[in-house]
């Protein structure tokens, strides 16, 4: 699934770094994700949940708040209000370039920010909080021993998660003014509250207060055994599964399909000897029948492609199809893709980038011809997309083949 990285202008005029996680096909809906305090858009929870939702047809935009990650500006000059304003700016950007988000997701303090911003994003129909505080001022507990000095000196450097951050008096004053309970009570959108009962950073009582303050429709899901940052992949994926299933009640999570477009179950491939010659095989794939053989030089009669020919054909077809899907989705002027492939054996010592250093290696050479009035950047992107075709990923990842005898 592709990830588009770009910048948009935040409330303070700074360029904020963003990532839009896209499904392989046309998105059924768009979501906006707000990360935790002092975190970034590429934290494990943000990335894993976004990718998992994209796999379910929901495009997810996440970005670094001012002064964090790859975004411009000074974190010390940011406030809770500026973060809320930047979330609204992000929604505006989606509205202008794609489609406004119908789903809003916030993790930790990002959850509080999402609740505060939701009323300013009219197209949003559903809101999800993950390990969110019921009071935005809860975050000051992370540096409570410095509060008096911040108020007295105006600015103090504190250590958060092992990293130094400067906190100003303005941040404390701004966050104290927010009445999050009022925002929750006036939400008028479907709400899903997700929280772990063993969260030792933001206690489960926060989820209770959010849930009680909200009006129906509202739901609560316990993230049993998960830590505050959802650092375990299984916890983030579970959260994404629940979010996608819950959100389907309120937003479009799958494009309506015609009967002929309904996905089929994976088809079996059956290969059977014909006994017409030494290597002749008949291959059945659903309604399709193909012939496989070996070249005459290898002892066959060349009645059909050989096993490696089918392997190359699979990679070539997948490459071309993946590039076509991307070009059509981006409205690129791609006329035709031609993929030419060749398989050979090479000495491992001749491959500088290969991990194997001895013996022989399989090498596939893939030449791609791109026809169309595309500029250099578009051609570069299409070549990057070629490496993301599912068959390419299969061939370059660990493969498990389970073989058993059938009576």
Image: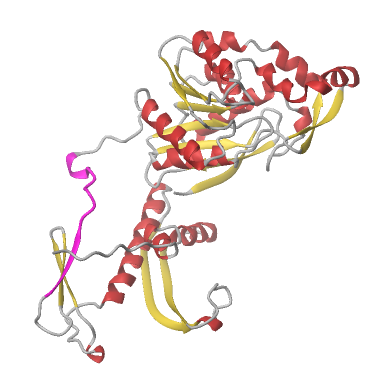
Q: Identify the image quadrant of residue 278.
A: bottom left
Residue situated in front as seen by the camera: 177 or 234:
234
Q: Position of residue 255 (x, y in %)?
A: 31, 36
Residue 124 in sight in this render: no
- The residue depicted at 10 percent of the width and 76 percent of the height is 274
Residue 213 location (% of width, % of height): 52, 8
Is residue 307 toward the left or the right of residue 95 in the image?
left
Q: Is residue 291 visible?
A: yes
User: Which residue is drawn at the image coordinates 17% and 86% (left, top)?
Assistant: 301
The C terminus lies in which quarter of the figure?
bottom left
Residue 279 x/y as whole percent: 18, 82
- In this picture, which residue range is highlighted in magenta? 259-273
Q: Which of the 4 image quarters holds residue 71?
A: top right
* Relative to 106, 217 lies left or right: left
The percent coordinates of residue 314 (x first, y second) are 31, 66
Examine the structure image and report whether residue 271 is included in the region drawn in magenta.
Answer: yes
């Amino acid at each position: 699934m592709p990830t588009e990285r770009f910048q948009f202008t935040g409330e303070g005029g700074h360029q904020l770094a963003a990532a839009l996680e896209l499904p392989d096909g046309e998105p059924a809906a768009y979501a906006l994700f707000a990360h935790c305090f002092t975190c970034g858009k590429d934290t494990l929870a943000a990335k894993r949940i976004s990718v998992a939702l994209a796999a379910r047809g929901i495009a997810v935009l996440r970005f670094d708040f001012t002064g964090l990650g790859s975004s411009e500006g000074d974190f010390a000059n940011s406030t809770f209000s500026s973060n809320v304003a930047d979330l609204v700016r992000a929604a505006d950007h989606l509205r202008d370039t794609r489609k406004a988000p119908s789903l809003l997701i916030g993790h930790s303090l990002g959850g509080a920010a999402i609740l505060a911003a939701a009323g300013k994003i009219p197209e949003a129909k559903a809101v999800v909080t993950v390990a969110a505080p019921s009071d935005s001022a809860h975050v000051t507990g992370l540096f409570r021993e410095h509060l008096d000095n911040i108020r007295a000196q105006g600015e103090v450097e504190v250590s958060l998660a092992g990293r130094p951050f400067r906190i100003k008096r303005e941040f404390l004053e701004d966050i104290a003014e927010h009445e999050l309970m009022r925002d929750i009570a006036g939400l008028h959108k479907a709400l899903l509250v997700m929280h772990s009962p063993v969260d030792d950073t933001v206690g489960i009582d926060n989820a209770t207060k959010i849930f009680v303050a909200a009006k129906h429709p509202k739901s609560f899901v316990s993230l049993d055994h998960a830590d505050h940052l959802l650092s375990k992949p299984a916890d983030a994926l579970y959260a994404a599964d629940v979010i996608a299933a819950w959100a389907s009640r309120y937003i479009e999570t799958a494009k309506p399909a015609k009967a002929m477009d309904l996905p089929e179950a994976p088809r079996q491939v059956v290969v059977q000897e014909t006994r017409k010659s030494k290597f002749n095989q008949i291959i059945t794939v659903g309604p399709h029948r193909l012939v496989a053989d070996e070249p005459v030089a290898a002892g066959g009669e060349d009645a059909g492609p050989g096993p490696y020919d089918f392997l190359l054909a699979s990679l070539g077809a997948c490459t071309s199809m993946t590039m076509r899907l991307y070009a059509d989705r981006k409205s690129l002027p791609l006329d035709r893709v031609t993929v030419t492939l060749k398989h050979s054996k090479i000495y491992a010592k001749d491959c500088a980038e290969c991990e194997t250093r001895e013996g022989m290696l399989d090498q596939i050479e893939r030449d791609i011809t791109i026809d169309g009035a595309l500029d250099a950047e578009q051609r570069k992107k299409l070549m990057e997309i070629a490496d993301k075709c599912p068959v390419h990923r299969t061939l370059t990842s660990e493969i498990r083949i389970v073989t058993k005898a059938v009576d």
